[in-house]
Image (cartoon, grey):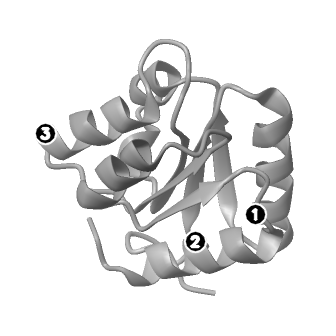
Amino acid sequence: MAESSRTNSPPLISVIDDDESMREALQSLLRSVGFRTTVFASAEDFLTSGRFSESDCLILDVRMPGMSGLELQQKLAAENRRIPTIFISAHSETDEKKRALDAGAIDFLYKPFSEESLLDAVDSALRSGTR
């Protein structure tokens, strides 16, 4: 596994999804393969946590109450905080996928997705060198 670009510890993956069961499942999966994780119920919670500066990869739900995942991606980019991002969505709208990928997302997965596809996307994100 790759190490965090800022420490000798495993990479920190931040999961931002309003669905508690999805947050718990992703946290369990990511920890089982050795990643450090933080989870947030909203984009606003993530922004106020201060963890964005430590995060090596984001897994973002597209649609959430309040600030959407796409809006968070735009806000971070406007502040020159380019964190490799993977979007997840239960909705198969091609416009959202195109917007996310055009703005620099590493991958866009539709729920339900396999553990393997998520872990492959995380690996790609960590190898991307985006930051």
Q: Are the residues flagged by discs 1 and 2 in contact, CB closer than 8 Å? A: yes
Q: Which residue is mark 1?
A: 30
**Counting other residues with Cα less than 10 Å from the Cα at mark 1, is it few (<14), some (14-19), or many (20 or more)?**
many
Q: Between residue 3 and residue 127, name the one nearer to us.
A: 127
For the residues labelled 1 and 2, the Cα–Cα distance comes to 9 Å
Q: Along the horizontal axis of the image, is 123 left or right of 117?
A: left
In the picture, the quarter occupied by the C terminus is bottom left
Q: Earlier in the sequence, mark 1 or mark 3?
A: 1
**Counting other residues with Cα less than 10 Å from the Cα at mark 2, is it few (<14), some (14-19), or many (20 or more)?**
many
Element at label 3: helix
Q: Between residue 96 and residue 73, name the one nearer to us.
A: 96
Q: Earlier in the sequence, mark 3 or mark 2?
A: 3
Q: Along the horizontal axis of the image, is 33 left or right of 131?
A: right
Q: Between residue 87 and residue 20, name the one nearer to us.
A: 87
In x, y percent, where is residue 81? 23, 49
The amino acid marked with disc number 1 is: Leu
Res 70 quadrant in image: top left
- Which mark lies nearer to you, 1 or 2? 2
Q: Along the horizontal axis of the image, is 67 left or right of 10?
A: left
In x, y percent, where is residue 122? 58, 71
Q: Between residue 53 and residue 123, name the one nearer to us.
A: 123
**Number of callouts:** 3
| Residue at screen point 37% across, 60% down | 105
Element at label 2: helix
- Label number found at residue 122: 2
| Residue at screen point 79% across, 40% down | 22
Q: Along the horizontal axis of the image, is 43 left or right of 64?
A: left
| Residue 79 seen anywhere in this rendered image of the structure | no
The amino acid marked with disc number 3 is: Ala
Res 17 quadrant in image: top right
Q: Which residue is mark 3?
A: 78
